[in-house]
Amino acid sequence: ASVEEFEQALRLAPGSARIYNDLGIALAMQGRLEDAIERFQRAVEADPEFKDARQNLATARNQLAAGSKQRAELNHCPLPAPSLQRL
């Protein structure tokens, strides 16, 4: 199912932990980790015992942190000078 389909499902069943979790998965698959984290958090708030949502929340947070760390490392790594080629 697509993000739009899960959003429509939430309009029909607001507060559904399962739908929030599924929406979070769909968002994460699109690389939208911050949005996914928000939906996983809502799933956990709706059902604190929902283990899959708790695991997905932790995984998404770790992926976001790892991506931020990699970007920071790249920003501090000097790029090699471009090589000039003769035509």
Image (cartoon, rainbow, N blue to C red):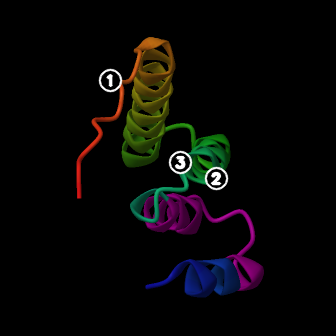
Instruction: Using the numbered discs, state the Cα–Cα distance from disc 1 to disc 2 in whole angstroms.
Output: 35 Å
**In terms of image quadrants, where is residue 56?**
top left
Q: Which mark is residue 33?
A: 3
The magenta segment is 10-27
Instruction: Using the numbered discs, state the Cα–Cα distance from disc 2 to disc 3 in whole angstroms.
Output: 5 Å
Label the magenta part by its dominant secondary structure.
helix
> Considering depth in this image, is 41 or 46 the residue closer to the camera?
41
Residue plotted at (47% across, 27% down): 71
Q: Earlier in the sequence, mark 1 or mark 2?
A: 2
**Residue flagged by tag 3: what amino acid is it?**
Leu
Q: Assess whether mark 2 and mark 1 are in contact (beta carbons under 8 angstroms).
A: no
Q: Which mark is residue 32?
A: none
Question: Residue 81 lies in magenta, yes or no?
Answer: no
- Judging by the rendered image, the residue that carries numbered circle 2 is 35
**Residue flagged by tag 2: what amino acid is it?**
Asp
**In terms of image quadrants, where is residue 87?**
bottom left
Name the element at disc 3.
helix
Residue plotted at (56% across, 77% down): 3
Above or below: residue 75 compared with residue 30: above
Q: Assess whether mark 3 and mark 2 are in contact (beta carbons under 8 angstroms).
A: yes
Name the element at disc 2.
helix
Q: Earlier in the sequence, mark 3 or mark 1?
A: 3
User: How many neighbours does mark 3 have within 10 angstroms: few (below 14), some (14-19), or many (20 or more)?
Assistant: many
Figure quadrant of the N terminus: bottom left
Residue plotted at (43% across, 32% down): 67
- Judging by the rendered image, the residue that carries numbered circle 1 is 80
**Residue flagged by tag 1: what amino acid is it?**
Pro
Q: Percent from the top left, x then y, of residue 39?
A: 62, 53
User: How many neighbours does mark 1 have within 10 angstroms: few (below 14), some (14-19), or many (20 or more)?
Assistant: few
